[in-house]
Every structure is written in C-alpha cells, then in structure tokens.
Amino acid sequence: MQRRFLLQLLGAAPLTFTPFPALAATVRKQPTVTGLEIFRVHVNKRGDWVLPRLKAEGGLTGLGDASHGGRDAETLRHLDRFAGLLKGRSIFDIAWFRQTTLPEVLQGGLPAAVAASALEHALWDLSGQVLSLPVYALLGGRIQPRIRLYANINRSTEPRNPDGFAHMASRAVADGFDAVKLAPFDDMPQGATDPATRERYTAEGVADAQAVRDAIGPNRDLLIDAHSRFSLQEGLALLPRLDPLKLFWLEEVTPAKPLSDLATINHTAKMPTAGGENIHGVAGFYPYIRAEAVDIVMPDVKYCGGILELKKIAALAEGAGLKTSPHGPASPVGNMAAAHAVAGVPNFNILEFSYGEVPWRAELVDPPEDTSGGALALSDRPGLGYKLNEKTAARYAASP
C-alpha cells in the first residue's frame, strides 16, 4: 500500500528520473491526515496503554504512545481535539503541530502533553513510511550501534520486599539485561511526617536495593529512583547509605522545586544523579540543566513533546556536557519512538524498559518487540518500523 501510494505521489515517474525531481513531486503532493483511531490496552494497576493511530491518505497509518498521562479521559479528549487540528494537514507539518498545540499543552499538563507527543510520534511514523525511510534517518541518521536498555522492575515486582525485588531482578538478568532499576522508597506514605515512620520506610528501601545488588552481582548496573520522597536534609543523609551499592545513578531524591535542592544533592553525591521525567520541552529543561540539578537528563518521549523535542533536549544537554537517558515505562511503541530519537544522539546513555508487566508485551506489535541481549532492536524498516497487532490489542483491550 505504501509503495503504491508513493508511486501515485510521484506521478508514476519513470525509474530513470533523478531523485531531486522525484523528491520535488513528493513535496508538491504531501499526503494529509484523514482521521484517528485509539486503542486502549489494559496492563495493570499502574495504568493502561493508550495508543493513537493516525490515518492518512492512501490507507497509511501512523502509531504513537499517549500512555501514563495520569487522567486517561482528559488524554482522550486532547487526542480528539489535536487530531481535529491535524485533519486535512500534511503529515509533514510536525513543527506547525508542535507550535500550534504548545499553549494548550502548557495549560493542560500531562494529559495534554502525552496527547500532543503521541500524535507527533504518529506524524513521524507516517513521514517515514511515505519516504520509505526509518524515522532515525529523517533525523540525521544513526550513530548508536545499539540502544542499550535497563530493566525497570518497579512496576512488576510483587511482593515489594527484598525477596520480591531480588526475584524479579534475577529474572531480568536471566533475560539478558545487565542494568536494573527499582524505586524502593515508593511505599513511604505521601505526607508522612513522623521521623520514626520515615526512617522505617527508608531502611526498608535500602534493604530492597541491597537485595537487588546481591541478586545481580557487582558487575551489572544498579539504578535507584527515589521518586522525590525526601527532603533535602533526608536526601543528604541517604547518600552515604547508598554509596556501598555502587549505583549507576540515583534519580530524583527531592522534589524539583526548588531546583537548588536537587543541585545540592547532585554536587554532594558520589554517584551520578538523573531526573527530569515530567518536564516538557526545551524551555522546561533549560532551567533544569542550567541549575546543574542532575548529571543525566531523562526526557520522556511521551511527555516532553515527542521525538523531535527529545532530540532537541538531548542537544541542549550535550552542550552542557550531560548525558541523555530517556525515561520510558512505555508500551513498545513509546520505547521505539524514543529509540529513534536517540539513535543519532552522541550523548545517549541508556533507555528505560518496563520489565515484566505483561507476558504478551512483545506481541502487541508486528514484528514483535526484540529486546534480546538487553538492547532494543532498531531496524531500517520505514517509519517507526512497527504495526499494531490488532488481535493482541483487542484481546487485552481496556474496559470503556
């Protein structure tokens, strides 16, 4: 279908044409967006996967990931509105779409951000298919030989105790991952102020992290996400307790406001620090980077504005001498979108992979997601390189 449509766009030009007239013909007849489908797939108590599929002329479709916006009903409303803005527009109008939706995204928070980001993914997917190129080729090509992953076991571990975390970490290692992340302090009650209660949950979290280190051994990488559970003074006291674990990084110890608290943690910590998963856009990351809040920035391709915005954020980090490691407890579509964004990023470090949530994860897309050897396989197929497996999506569809 895509090849036939491309020939139509080129006016059935003979194969002897030079590429420049062919490209000019393509630009003159840019396919336009015609509609939107949305697939909601139930995963677990952490939320569903929300996967929009943009439709364009010639039967083309492009995928995106609008998951984990916090309020799916609002995300769906924004998806419908933003797709309405795109209807009749060229699939190449990515910069226009970003600029047009930005005011609403800044006002609407995460639900609006994930909706706009997801449709941006879909536009890139469509663009690559029309031009018969992978998205990373449209962004300047690929320099990363592999897209290394870390297994985030936090969403799948039950029970949340040392044995439970150690068991899931051992499974990830057996599946080829050489880096594992957990958020061992998540059970600390929000708003708890009693020092004895806070110390009990802190000690339990340190024990969970130690169990994972013991399970994966000294030569694999261990990552800890503190999910902003600590005050500045608590965070400073936590650092020496985690030093023996030889962390690959420590993530978001304190809330992002004030940034000076994260910067103090960063300057004090012996291990690298990381964060920024909920920040939108270059404008949002600029003060974060300028404040020296972290060593490693973590834009999420679902939140930050999409593929192009993630690459721009990575360039901003590169200029500051920082690494980029996209946040991404995402569906296979979201992870692949992030992989295309960082394939040509010189300061790319590692990509998040939500490990063990559902056994059918890889089968949600065609061809099936390939994470063998702890890396995400990135092919030269056009666009993002995936089609949705509608049978799997239907089998595990979320309730209306």
Image (cartoon, grey):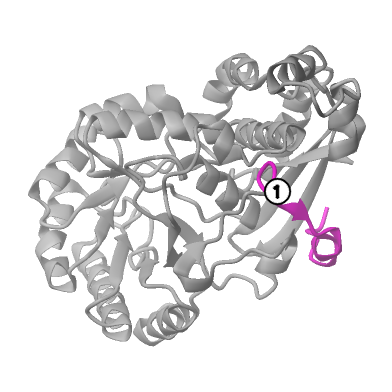
Residue for point 82% across, 23% down = 31
Residue for point 42% across, 49% down = 144
Quadrant containing the N terminus is top right
Q: Is residue 382 left or right of residue 200?
A: right
Q: Amino acid at mark 1?
A: Val
Is 56 in front, or is 169? 56
Residue for point 61% across, 53% down = 379
Q: Secondary structure at mark 1?
A: strand
The spot of residue 217 in percent (x, y) is 26, 83
The spot of residue 55 in percent (x, y) is 84, 34
Is residue 156 placed above or below 28 in the rendered structure? below
What residue is pinned by disc 1?
Answer: 50
* Total tally of numbered discs in the picture: 1
Is 302 in front, or is 24? 24
Is 39 in front, or is 53? 53
Q: Quadrant of residue 225?
A: bottom left
What is the crowding at mark 1: few (fewer than 14 residues within 10 Å), some, or many (at least 20)? Answer: many
Q: Is residue 132 left or right of residue 208?
A: right
Q: Quadrant of residue 73?
A: top right
The spot of residue 212 in percent (x, y) is 32, 79
State the extent of the magenta-drawn residues as a range.
382-400
Residue 132 visible in the displayed image: yes
Is residue 307 placed above or below 287 in the rendered structure? below
Verify whether residue 394 appears in magenta.
yes
Residue for point 77% across, 20% down = 26
Verify whether residue 258 appears in magenta.
no
